[in-house]
Every structure is written in structure tokens, then in C-alpha cells.
Amino acid sequence: MTAPDNARSNGDAARTTQLNTGPSSRWLLVMLCLAIGCWLATGFFVVRGDESGVVRIFGRAERNEDGNVRLRSNGVYWHLPWPCSTIDRVRLGEVRTVPVGPAEAVTSEQTDLLRLMEPTGKSQFLTGDRNILQVQLNIQYRVSVEAVEDWLYSAGDVERRLQLLAEAALSDVVLQSGVDFVHTLGHSEICGAVFDRLATLSDTSRLGVTIEDVTIAGVAPPVRVKSHFVDVMNARADRETYINRASAYAEQQLADAGASSRQLLDQAESYRQKTTDLAQAEADSFNRLVDQLETTATTLALSYAEARQLATQRQRLDTLQELYPRVKMQVLLDETQPVDLTLHRNPSGN
């Protein structure tokens, strides 16, 4: 074969290879572009209305100019695709509840099977007077906006650590209280003390949470001594009932005594006023009589004794004039002779 023939053969082979490889290269380029586009599309993320988003670039959180973690509100965003960046979402407004102590430990009614399964030492606290009580708390908290970085990256298992801190705070408070105070009387005071200590401990431990409220879900004695506690509670209730009854009876007696004393005082005051008025009226009548006698003595040119005798005689006659019509029998007496006025009642009644 001559040289021109060889050159012609090589050119044909090259054109054949170019025709065979051209479409495959284009398809590979298209697939590569699609893959890159899909990878870039993974950089889009959505933050819902009840969430806030924190973007981590190569493991480091985005920060604002003041150095705090940058929080993204609800909306659609784009950032470097995975694995260059990671999105952490957190609900800052959500109030979460963490129970401290199993609910089975404080139920009011337990079957024999549940009593056998009673947890040993869990949620049991020693009081200051050496009694054991089972206490369950409910801790309500939310993620702190100022310390969201601690919540996301520093605290680890936040709720477990919060439970341990709450148990420590509750143990300290219960150890300084008596069994009656913890069991029935001091729930509000205990919740307040635990709230204050837990808020301080959570800030010191950098949990990134804000304590909203602490409530006691239940307090109960261990099952083995529960009947004795019930007896004590019943006795205390009976004592309070008797005390209340006695207090009510005492108040009623005091009210009755007060009413009686006020009535006697009113009667005495009325009698005093009546007697005083009557005495004053008699005194005024006597003074008028004396004035009248003096006036009569002056008018008739008599002495005061003669005027008094004349007035006395006149009153006697007026009195007799009033009495005579009332008597059934009249007796005429001699003034110079003594008279026996002894009256003998007739046994027959006539």
C-alpha cells in the first residue's frame, strides 16, 4: 500500500473515532452539569414560622458583627451545600416540660404488681426529720435566645442534665424541710426555692435554657409505709375538723355573749335614763310646788308653813275625791277616837 493510501486510511479511522466519541462526551458533560446543579440546589433551606435557623460553615456557626450567633428567621435561604454547611433549627418560643421522677412513684392507686415493681431509690428524697418521700417535679423551660449556642453545641443532653440539676436542687430543699412541710404544707415554697436554685445552676452549667416554671406533680410516701401516712393524714384531718368545730362553737358563744351583754347594757342604760328622767320630773314638780307655795303665801299674806298646810289639805281632799268612787264600802270615822283598820278576808270569798 502506498503512502497516500495509508494517509487516507488513517484519516478515515480518525473521523470514525470522533463520530463515535462525540455524543458520549456531551452526555457526560450534561450529566456532570446536572449533578453540580443538584448539589448546588441542596444549598437551599427553609426555616418555618415557629423556628429559627443557625448555619454552620465547616462546623463553625455564623456570627453577627457583635459576635453572637446569627439567627435566621422564617423564610427561604441559600448557603453552601452539604457538606460545606449544616443547618440547625431550634424552636425558641416552645415551652418544654421535663419530668423529674417517674410518674409511677407518685400515683395514688397502685396494684400489687406495680407495688412489686416500685423503683428503688428513684425520686426518693430524705427530709430534714429523716423521713423518705417520693416527689415528682415538672420543669418547664424554653431555649434561651442569648445562649442558643450553648443549647446547640455545649450542653450535650440538655434535658438529662437538667433533670440531674433539678434532683440536686430538690434534694437540698427537702433536706432542710420537715415531712409535713414537703408532703402537704409547703408545695409553693418548695417550688419557689427549687426554681431559684435551678435557674442559677442552669446558668452556671451553660445549658442554654431559661427556666419558666417548677411545679410539683405529686408527693407520696413509699408504698410500704403508705398506710401509716394515710392514718396520719386522716388523724390530722380529724384534728383540723375538731379544731374548726371548736373554733366555730367558741365564736358562736362569744357572739351570743356579746349580744347578751349589749342587750343588758341597753336595758341598764334605758332603765338609768328612765329613772333619771322620772327623778328629774319629780324634782321639777317639787320645785314648782315650792314656788307655788311661796307665791300663795305671798299672795294670801300667810306664812310658808300655813301655805304648806293649806296645800297639803287640798291635795288630801283631791286624793280622797279620786279614791272614794273606787271603794265599795265607806266608813265614817271620828277623828278624836283611835280606829283599828285591820281587814279580815272572808273565807267564803264574798
Image (cartoon, rainbow, N blue to C red):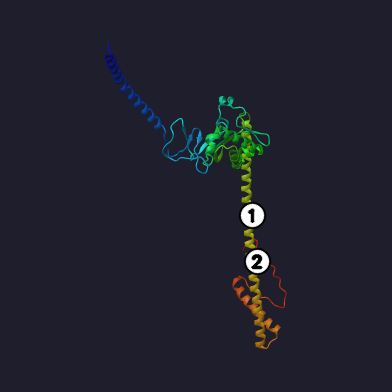
From the image, which quarter does the N terminus lie in? top left
Question: Which amino acid, by three-letter code, is at mark 1?
Answer: Ala
* Residue 119: quarter of image: top right
Task: Locate residue 156 relative to residue 23 in the image: left or right.
Answer: right
* Residue 289: quarter of image: bottom right
- Residue 49 location, x and y as percent? 43, 40
Question: Which amino acid, by three-letter code, is at mark 2?
Answer: Arg
Nearest the eye: 321 or 254: 254
* Residue 345: quarter of image: bottom right
- Residue 239 location, x and y as percent? 64, 41
Instruction: Provide the residue designation for mark 2.
Output: 272
From the image, which quarter does the C terminus lie in? bottom right
Nearest the eye: 146 or 342: 146
Task: Locate residue 16 relative to residue 224 in the image: left or right.
Answer: left
Q: Give the residue at the far front of this rendering.
A: 3
Q: How many marks?
A: 2
Nearest the eye: 60 or 277: 60
The residue shown at (67%, 85%) is 297
The residue shown at (62%, 45%) is 244
Indicate the secondary structure of the residue bearing disc 2: helix
Callout 1 environment at 10 Å: few (<14), some (14 to 19), or many (20+)?
few
- Residue 34 location, x and y as percent? 36, 28
Nearest the eye: 8 or 280: 8
CA separation in Å, label 1 and label 2:
22 Å
Residue 257 is marked as 1
The residue shown at (62%, 53%) is 255
Sooner in the amino-acid sequence: mark 1 or mark 2: 1
Callout 2 environment at 10 Å: few (<14), some (14 to 19), or many (20+)?
few
Indicate the secondary structure of the residue bearing disc 1: helix
Residue 350 is marked as none
Which is closer to the viewer, label 1 or label 2?
1
Q: Give the residue at the far bottom of this rendering.
A: 301
